[in-house]
Amino acid sequence: MREDIKVYVIKKASKKFLYMKYVDPETNREITRSTKTNRMKEAIRAAGRWESELRSGQYKGTCRTKWEDFRERYEVEHVSGLSPETDAKISAVFNMVEQILNPKRLAELTAANISRYQSELRHLGRSEQTIKSHTTHLKAALNWAVSVELLPKAPKISLPSRAKGATMMKGRPITGEEFERMIACTESIVKSSEKASEWRLLLNGIWHSGLRLGEALNLTWDNPDKLQIEFIRDRVMILIPAELEKGNRDRRLPTIPAFAELISSVPESERTGYVFNPPPMRHTESGRLVDEQVGRIITKIGKKAGVKVSEKGGKVKYASAHDLRRSFAARLALKVPAQQLMQMMRHESIETTLKFYVGQDADNLSDLVYSAFENGHSRDFLRDPAPIEAKSPPQRVDVKG
DNA sequence: GCAGAGCCTCTAATTTAGGA
DNA sequence: TCCTAAATTAGAGGCTCTGC
C-alpha cells in the first residue's frame, strides 16, 4: 500500500469536465486524468477511487507507446541476444502484423485484434501450426513489453490447438537400399566424380553418425571452437561445445564403429580443417556452402533417387539430411535400449527417443521378439510368473538431469 | 536456364518458466 | 516435485530476384 500517493481534483480552463491529478513519487511526473464529470461531488468520489487503486497497485494506466518504438526496443534489447534464426522469424511475424493490423500504438494489440490477426492468417491459407507460431512469438513479445513496463497488462491470447491428424514427424527413416540409391545418384546431381566423392563422404558421415546437418558441417579435425574429432585408440569421439549444440551443453559423443572406420579412411595428411567439405557446383567466393544450400542439394539427391519420405495431399517430400539422422536413430533403436539411444541422439526428453521405437514396423518388431526367444527366454515366458520380491522401489529415470 | 541468395512459411525438437 | 505451457532454436522447402 502506497500511502504517499494523493490524488487531487483540479479545474482546467476551457475544459468541460473536472480533472484529477497526482505526482508519481518514483518518477516525479504529474499524471492527469479526466473525471468525466463537471460535478465536484462525483469528481471527488472518482479521485478517491483512483487514489485507492493507485495505492493498492491495482491501477493499470493506458499505454501510449508507439508500435514502431516498441518494435525497435524489442529487437535491439531482446531479440539481438537470440539466435539469428529466431531474429529472422520474429521480424517476419512483425512484418505480417504490420501488413494485417498496421498498429500505430502497442496498446492496439488487444486480444480482439490478435484474434482478427489469426483469422486473417487463416484466410490467407496459413496452417494452424504457422498461426500458432506467430501467436506465440507475439505473446512472448507482449509479455516482454509488460516486463519492461511498456504495457500495463498483456492481452489474454488463445493459441490454436494442433490440427487433428497432424503428424509429429515430417519425414521418415530411410532404408539401407534407399540410401544406396542416393549414393549412386550423387554424381549425376553434383556433375563431377571428384565432387561426388566429397558429397558421398558427407552423406555417409550423417548416415553413420546421426549428426544434425549443421553439426556435420561444423565438424572439424582440429578446431576446439567447433565440433571436433577425437581419436581414442580405435574409437572415435565427437566433442561438441555447448554453443553449437541444440541441447546447449558441452558433450562428448561416442560414435559407432562404421563411423570410426569412415573417418579413419581419410589420410592423416588431410586431417585438417572441416571434416566434410561438400564443394559447390560452381565457383563461389567463399568456396564453402552454407547449411541451407547443402540441405537443398541433399534433397535433390533424394529426389533423383526417388526416395519419397512423405506424400500428403499430392505433395511429395523426398529424403533430406534429417531423414538420414532419423534413419541412424531407427537402426540404432534395434540394437540399444532407449536410454542409450537417447544419449547418442542427444535428446533431452525420452519421449522424443521413444518415437523411434514406436515407429518400428512389424517386421523389425517381429525380429526383436524372435531374437529374444532364441536367447532361451521362451521357457521363462511359459513359466508361472515369479513371486514379486520385496525390493527397493523401481528407479525413476530423470530425463531432465 | 540455372545457381545462388534472401525472405518467408511450416514443422519438429528442445529448453525454460510457472503453476498445481 | 512434477507437469504443462510458453519460448526458443533448427531444418526443410517454396517463392522470387539477380547475375552469369
Image (cartoon, coloured by chain):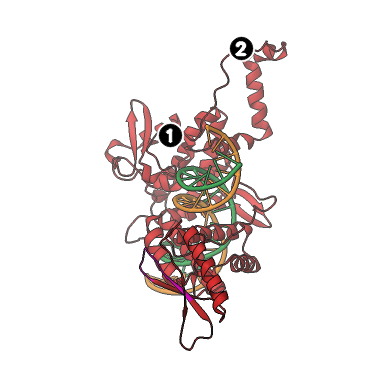
Chain colours: A red, B green, C orange
Q: Residues within 10 Å of mark 2 (few under 14, many from 20)?
A: few
Q: Residues within 10 Å of mark 1 (few under 14, many from 20)?
A: many
Residue A278, image x and y in percent?
39, 50
Task: Tell which of A150 and A34 is nearer to you.
Answer: A34
Q: Which residue has dot 1 on it? A: A259
The image quadrant of residue A222 is top left
Return the residue at label 2.
Answer: A390
What kind of residue is marked 2?
Ala
Disc 1 element: helix
View extreme (left): residue: A269
Residue at the location (57% across, 37% down)? Answer: A351
Label 2 to label 1, Cα distance in Å?
44 Å
Q: Is A74 placed left or right of B9 in the picture?
A: left
Tell me if C3 is positioned left or right of A286 in this view.
right
Which of the two residues, A387 or A337, is positioned nearer the viewer here?
Answer: A387
Image spot of residue A225 (x, y percent): 30, 44
Question: Mark 2 falls on what kind of element?
Answer: loop
Same chain for mark 2 and mark 1? The answer is: yes
Q: Which residues are magenta?
A: A20-29
In the picture, measured across the screen, residue A34 lies left or right of residue A235, that is right
Q: Is residue A299 magenta?
A: no
